[in-house]
Each structure stands twice: as C-alpha cells, then as structure tokens.
Image (tube, rainbow, N blue to C red):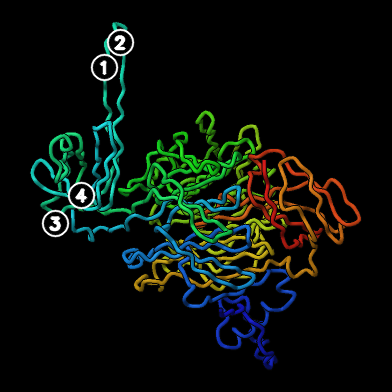
Amino acid sequence: MKIRHTGGRTKRYALGSTVALVVAGMNAPAVLGFAGDQYHHYVINRPGYKAEYGHWQTLELPTRFRVNAVHATLLRTGKILIVAGSGNDQQAFDAGTFKTLLWDPVKSTYKLIPTPVDMFCGGHTSLPDGKVLVAGGTLRYEKLDGAVNKAAGTMRVRNENPDAPRTFAKGTVFTGPDGREYASTAPVTVPAAAKTVTRAADGRTSVSVTAGERQVFVEAVAEGASYVDRNPAQYRIKGLTGADARNLYGMGGAMTLDKQDFQGIRSAYEFNPDTELYEQVPDMAHARWYPTLTGLGDGKVVTVSGLDETGQILSGNDNELFDPATRTWSKAPDRYFPTYPSLFLTASGKLFYSGSNAGYGPADKGRTPGLWDLGNNSFQTVDGLRDPDLLETSSSVLLPPAQSQKVMVLGGGGVGESPASTARTGIADLSAPEPHFVPGPDLPAGGTRYLNSVILPDDTVFTTGGSGDYRGKHRSDLLKAQTYHPDSNSFTTAAAPAVGRDYHSEALLLPDGRVVVLGSNPLFADKADTQPAAFEQRIEIYSPAYLYHGDRPEIAAAPGRASLGSEITVATPDPDRIATAKLIRPSSVTHATDVEQRSVALDITARGATGITLSLPRNADLLPPGWYMLFATDRKGTPSVARWIQITP
C-alpha cells in the first residue's frame, strides 16, 4: 500500500523573498509554480493548521485490491465492507466479474470476498446482530438512445394452472399473433394460479381462478424496425402444446427501440462479519435497482423503490419488510418514492422522507418531504424547504443528538441530467407540533450535488466533496470540506481534500474518529467534456481538528452488550474529564445516501473514582437494536477511541 500524505512534510527550502512573494499572493485565485506548491504543503502540515482545519491523507491500495467503491458499510469488527459488484463497468458485468473488498483501515489489510450476484446499485443496511443485509442489484445494463438495435419491452407471463408454478429459461420465445417473435432476457418463474371456491346459500359451489403472473423483459429475435410494435397483444409460448399452451401465455406491451434503463434483481444476501462471507436469504418478491433499506425499531427492515426487472420504476404498492429473525419477506404499506429515497426512522416510529433521492422517477411525483406512518399508511407533508425542485442528489442527515429530532437537507440538483444545483440547506424540526423546515446556512462552496455528510463524535457534521454540475461535468468537482455546527447553525472551513468526489461516492466515520471518503464516478476528465473519466479508486482519510488538540480521553472498558433503558458502567482513568457520551450507529452508505447513521446522547448519571455510569434511552425507535460505537468526549470536543456495544431490546 502506498500512502501519500496530502502535503507530506517537506524540507524547509530557503524561505526568504520566495516565501514572502508566495505569502503576498495567497489571497489570489491560485498560487502557481513550484514554490507556491511547496509552501502550501508546508502550511497544511503545520500543527496549528491541523488543530484548526484537520488533515487529509490519500491512500492508493495495492493494484489487485483496487475496486470501484459504490457501497460502503462499517462493520462491528471495525472493517469496511466495500461493494463494487460490476462497478458500473459493462465489460465486468458481461464477464460476470463482481467484486467486494473487505478493508481494515487500522491494520491496512485487504481481502476480496466472493460476490455471488451483481450487487451494483442494490440497497443495504446493518441488522441487529451485526450482519449486513444486501438486497437488489443489476440484472442488465442500460442501453441509451441510438444503441438499441432490437425492439424490446415487457412481457407479463401468466399461468392459469392452479396446481403448479412454471419456470421458463432465459431465451424462451414468445410468438405474437402476426408471427413476430421475442425472446426473454432472463429466466422467470411464474407462480401457480390462485383458485377460489365459493359456496352459495343454495349449496351450489363455484370455482374461480386468478392467473399467476410475473413479468420479464423480452427483445426481438432479430434486429430492425420491423419488430417495433406499440400495440398490446397476447403471445404464445413457443414449444408448449395442449393444456400447457392454453394455461401459459404472455401479455406483451409495446415493443420499441427506445432507450432501455438498468434492470434490477430480486436476490438478497446477508454478509456475516464473523465468517466474512455472503449468506443467501430468500429473494424479495420484487426486483430492485436503486432501492433504499431502512432499519426499524423492531429490528425489521423496510425496503422501498427501485427499478424492476424490466427497467420500470416500482409503483409503490410493492414495498417489502424483511424480518431477520425468520429471514422472511412480507408486504409493507403502499407508498411511492423515487429511487434511493432518504428515509429516517424517527422517535415516533414514523419514517421521515427528507425529499433527498438519487435519480429515477418523474419530476412531479414522490418528491415532497413528509412523515410516513407505517401503522396506518398516512403521510404528513413537511413544508418550508427552499428550492424544493432541487432535491435530487442532495444529502440528508439526522442531526446530532438524535433526541433533537432534526433532519438537515444539504444541496442537491435538478431531476435527471439537469445542470442545476443549489447551495441551500434546510432543517426539518420533527419535534414541533406541526413539523416544518427552517432555513439553514448556505453551503460555503455554492451549488453542490453529491455532497457526503458524516456525523462526528463532537456533535458536529462533516461535509465534503460534491460537484456543481451533473456527475462533475465541466470539471465541476468541489475540492472543499466544511463542518456544520448545530449549536450555532453555522459552517466552519475544514482542510480541503485533494481528490474530487461526485456520483458513486461515500464517506463514513471510523471508530477512531477519522472519516473515510471513497469512490467517485465522473462522466468526463476534462472541462470541455470530451474525454471519458476513470472511476476514482483512491481513498482519502480525514483526521478532524479535534485529533490535534492534545491527548484523548479514554474508555478503558465497557460492556459488550446493553439493553434499552438500562444503565452501564464505563471504566475511564479520568471520569471528571468526560463531558459527553453517545452511541453512534455505523454508516451504510451509497450514492452519498446514508439513512442509518445516528448519534444518540447518553445521560451521565454518576461518576466514580474509576468510571462513569451512563443511562440508555428506552425508546427503540430512537435507539434501534444493533451495534453502535460508544464515544466519550471531553469539554473541548476531543473524542475517545470508540468501544463497540450491541444494543438489545
């Protein structure tokens, strides 16, 4: 592994008039030349600079361990699960090359994990036992306008036989009334028909059959516009005869040469941090690409949105619940959302949709922030957000402490490939009698999409990267970072990163208080947008300023498990130094979206000679079951290294 400190300590060259010249020009738009670069490196490595702004280092992993980081989850082992899948690489997808990297940022060890399906652009969340649920991913890559040479569309395959399901292989041919043929691009299993027996008052019985149905994407068996057909029709399944031919058939929609979107899969897996392997769980009922998974207070996971196996966005009557205790899926209440919606569990048990999302869906549907009650399936609109039409690719975070019940929305842009972006931030006060947004300070860097936001142990929020345009077009990546202070509702400047980050980027907090930033998938490498850009595989680690304020408080020992509403005793050599304690849920982040991280404040109820006693909240919706990092901070905001603790009901 090569580690290049951003501005590693350099020799103090003859400063004299050269440095004086550079200092005089420091407020100019840029400092040019060798001397200016050397002085910049000198400045950012000074102890005083680090103590005010923090410090970055850039990591270049060994070649065989470099992956396109699309998804990142911090495990209770301290390692980071980095999922690439095919990594937005059509050639890797076609070759079936799917990657997952397990990285230990403390020991600098790496391990490639066998990856059974293409988890690229699936959803994920940590479960109460510390495993990671990964659901959905990629069935088929998109084809843009002009690249489609075979007419294609959705085929709804029906089964009127109530006695048995039926599986059809990839390549099954469906023949239309006019003889045109279309072949399936994936296997499909059609459930048996549902048979209902009704007995009338006079004793007579009647039997009704509702056909089982699944959909599959099909494309013409040959190229050309002659296969374009925009009329719905019933199709025969080639090779079937007799009763099978009558009971099994396809209902086709429009067959066109239009653009084809990515298509999702139903597959679901748990990653086990002990065995460091994926373990298959039952498939979802619906295929998903770009879904959101949010953990609930009872340990279950609600799964919403995504593109299905034909590339269509799910309608909202297909949300699902995963129960990790039984490893089963069930139907969740109906509610439509654009893809990758930011859904936060609130202390009331409702889910707050901040309006942030990552890209697919109409501009006039499912964009309004609000509180979703899963119990009665009601939705309470939360108004007051500025630039409500610029929420796509925005960032959202549950502000610390979680007890304040405030969610901040930062930046964002227009729907689709819009170049529009906003510097707006807004804060939703969910504890108010009528929840509403109030304005926050504008982002210092101006209009920003793809910003990553990370809760720190000192109750601030570190934000970094992003771009001013869609996917960093026109070299619009922002080499800026800043820290938001909820107590003063203001930003302060942080040290600037060296690597641009936009689409497919992530950031997360480590147990030692540092922040890891990964990924980025810009469209172009040049300002004129003529040269394609490579996926950014370098990793950066940011050390916040609080790590340069002297020695740190220490948690010498802590219990490995605690229940809601209980008290725990934490050993520390200087109990009087500890000012605050909190439990921070580890991040599970993709596409700058992290709905899992939260910081829950703990009351210090007693101080002894060798430790402190902490009181845990009783509310599972405030403190959902699972693994947390326990941090203690002193009055300067300097945090301890965290201890892992499992919270149980």
CB within 8 Å, label 3 to label 2: no
Residue 499, percent from left and from top:
53, 72
Label 4 neighbourhood size at 10 Å, few (<14), some (14-19), many (20+)?
A: some
Task: Determine whether label 1 and label 4 are within 8 Å by CB.
Answer: no
Circle 2 is placed at which residue position? Answer: 200
Residue matched to label 4: 172
Tell me which corner region of the image, top left, top right, bottom left or bottom right, holds residue 316. Answer: top left
The reply, left or right, for residue 60 in relation to residue 142 is right
Mark 3: secondary structure: loop
Q: Which residue is mark 3?
A: 222
Q: Residue furthest front?
A: 163
Mark 4 and mark 2 in contact (Cβ < 8 Å)? no
* Mark 1 neighbour density, 10 Å: few (under 14) some (14–19) many (20 or more): few
- Labelled disc at residue 585: none
The alpha-carbon separation of the residues under discs 3 and 2 comes to 53 Å
Residue 469 lies left or right of residue 539; in this view the side is: left
Q: Quadrant of the N terminus?
A: bottom right
- Specify the quadrant that holds the C terminus: top right
